[in-house]
Image: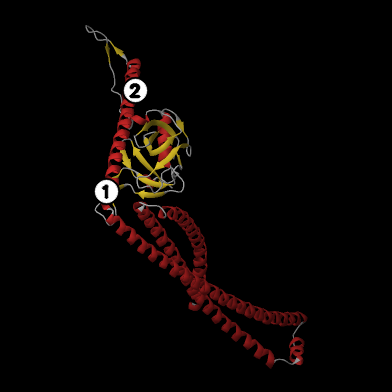
Amino acid sequence: MKKFLFAIILFCGSVSLLMAQTNDKAELENERKQIQDELKAIQKTYDQVKSQKNQSLTQLNMLKRKMNLQEKYISTINRELRMIDDDIYYSNLEIYRLSKQLDTLKAEYARTIVYAYKNRSNFDYVNFIFSATSFNDAMRRIAYLKSYRAYREKQVATINKTQELIAKRQQQQLVRKGQKNDALQTQTKQRNELASQRKEKDAVVSKLKSEEKDLQKQITAKKKRDRDLQNAITAIVRREIEAARKAEEEKAKANAAAAAPVTTTPGKPNATVTTPARKPESYLEVNAADIALGADFSKNKGRLPWPVDNVFVKIPFGVYTIEGTNIRGNNPGITLGTPKGSSVKAVFDGDVSSVANTGEGYMVAVRHGKYYTVYSNLVSVNVSKGGKVKTGQVIGKAGDSDDGSGGELMFMLMIETNNVNPSSWLR
């Protein structure tokens, strides 16, 4: 009984594992394909950057991205190897179970053969039938002999089927072992590639250290541009908040005056009782359209499209340090590398709050309810202040970068006057 229960548990476990592995394998293959596609895309851009001069910072960031993807790729291979090992282990258990079952079937069949051999005389079968006490008893004995023969045939069929299952499992084991060898070879190749990338990164870091003064000048200039851009955007947002606040207060006063009851007190002039207007959560969401737009924008967190194609993050959001140097900064958005002249697109529906020339390129600010997206370092602009844009609409072209490594875009996301990390909002 215990052996039977063990076999049932093993079978159920094997089926559950097989179903889980099937789903995991599909997800793993999809993830690996995405990583490979991204690696190909970034390698193509990296080859262009590598052939240029004064591209060390860009090259370093792209190498870091490549290494990160490479590590993810190796991680998927490791997961595949674990799945293969699990499959081989459970297949061995299944082969063991089937072998035990085959031994039992053969033993039972052997007993029936021995019994048939001992009673092989036709006379014995005839005597068995004619020794019946009645016609019905004789028919039951004939039926028994038929069922006994069918049982023996079924035994043979079950034994053959079990042998086929064992052979199939063994063949699958050979296939899985071959897949494991292929995966191990791929793993070794990718690890060598990662080691090569690390060496290349160390060389770039060394070059950056030797050019730290020039790089410091670039970062200092960037800090000034970021500060000026931040002040300009903050001023725009505050003006819009103040204008919306005044409009809301005037509207509230007008509504209160129109709806206020008039009370008469003897000996006193008529008095108007007014109720103070309730302060809205955000003056930028006083209209139903603004509220709906802001809510839609919020719902799409993590699913917004990137503002440019063929893009990589040169400098992340927030505090950063350039590896191998003492240079530090605080990025109000994310600095994106892209081919010069690439189309810059709106990441969501909205209203154009500002279009300005910053002296080193154009800046476009788009309002989405209480949210703002800012696109800076544009060489040209296709929209105008007060206009509306749709998701994916081209609003301009990316300008050149300071280090001459290609195009560059500064992308910012703000909730009113507060900067947030755009990366967590983009898909």
Element carrying mark 2: helix
In this picture, residue 372 sits left or right of residue 168: left
In this picture, residue 212 sits left or right of residue 354: left
For residue 57, say whether it is visible.
yes
Residue for badge 1: 216
Please tell me which residue is depicted at 50% across the width and 77% down the height of the picture.
92
Residue with the most extreme left position:
267
Identify the image quadrant of residue 286. top left
Name the amino acid, label 2: Ala
Name the residue nearer the viewer: 142 or 17. Answer: 17
Q: Is residue 35 above or below residue 150?
A: above
Residue for badge 2: 247
Residue 426 is situated, as x and y percent measured from the top left of the image, at 41, 46
Q: Is residue 246 above or below residue 105?
A: above
In this picture, residue 10 sits left or right of residue 282: right
Name the residue nearer the viewer: 264 or 325. Answer: 325
Residue 187 is situated, as x and y percent measured from the top left of the image, at 44, 68
Q: How is the image coloured?
A: secondary structure
Q: Is residue 261 above or below residue 210?
A: above
